[in-house]
């Protein structure tokens, strides 16, 4: 457990240093999504910046190849889990997976 925590702290520290030295917003956001993916041990990660009109101004991914993105189709989508997240200011996490979101019969948990 300690080794995992040490690696996580090192990754977080590296991300903070990189972000603090960067002046380009798109680069900072991409580094954030990449660092979040690494820290969570996730295969994929995404970061959406709402545009205030029900969609996304920016949508960044990490861990997804161009071939996978092409297979998934146009990003971002504003229905399902992403639509639910756009409808609240609270952080939202799926309880199982995005394929079981409320719009397809699943559930989400809103964290307070």
Image (cartoon, rainbow, N blue to C red):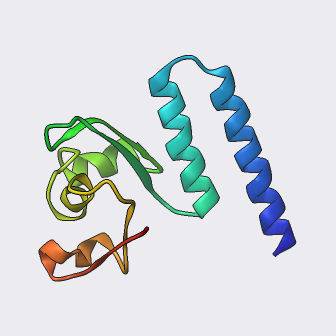
At 29% across and 70% down in the image, what residue appears? 98
Q: In which quarter of the image is the N terminus?
A: bottom right
Place of residue 16 in the rendered image (x, y in percent of width and height, measured from the top left): 69, 37
Q: Quadrant of the C terminus?
A: bottom left
| Up-down relation of residue 47 to residue 112 (above or below) | above
Please state which of residues 70 and 18 is positioned toward the viewer in this rendering. 18
Please state which of residues 41 and 18 is positioned toward the viewer in this rendering. 18
| Up-down relation of residue 98 to residue 78 (above or below) | below
| Up-down relation of residue 107 to residue 70 (above or below) | below
| Up-down relation of residue 110 to residue 18 (above or below) | below
Task: State how many labels appear.
Answer: 0
Place of residue 41 in the rendered image (x, y in percent of width and height, measured from the top left): 60, 64
Indicate left or right for 58 with 37 as reference.
Answer: left
Please state which of residues 90 and 5 is positioned toward the viewer in this rendering. 90
At 47% across and 50% down in the image, what residue appears? 63
Q: Residue furthest front?
A: 112
- Say which quarter of the image contains residue 34: top right
Place of residue 62 in the rendered image (x, y in percent of width and height, measured from the top left): 46, 46
At 25% across and 74% down in the image, what residue appears? 99
Indicate left or right for 52 with 38 as reference.
Answer: left
Place of residue 72 in the rendered image (x, y in percent of width and height, measured from the top left): 23, 54
Indicate left or right for 39 with 13 as reference.
Answer: left
Q: Which residue lies furthest to the top in this view?
A: 23
At 16% across and 52% down in the image, what residue appears? 78
């Amino acid at each position: 457990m300690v080794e995992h925590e040490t690696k996580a702290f090192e990754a977080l520290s590296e991300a903070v240093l990189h972000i603090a030295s960067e002046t380009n917003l798109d680069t900072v956001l991409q580094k954030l999504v990449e660092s979040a993916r690494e820290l969570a041990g996730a295969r994929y990660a995404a970061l959406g910046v709402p545009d205030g009109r029900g969609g996304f101004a920016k949508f960044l991914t990490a861990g997804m190849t161009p071939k996978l993105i092409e297979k998934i189709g146009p990003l971002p989508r504003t229905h399902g889990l992403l639509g639910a997240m756009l409808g609240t200011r609270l952080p939202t996490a799926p309880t199982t997976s995005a394929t079981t979101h409320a719009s397809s019969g699943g559930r989400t948990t809103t964290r307070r």
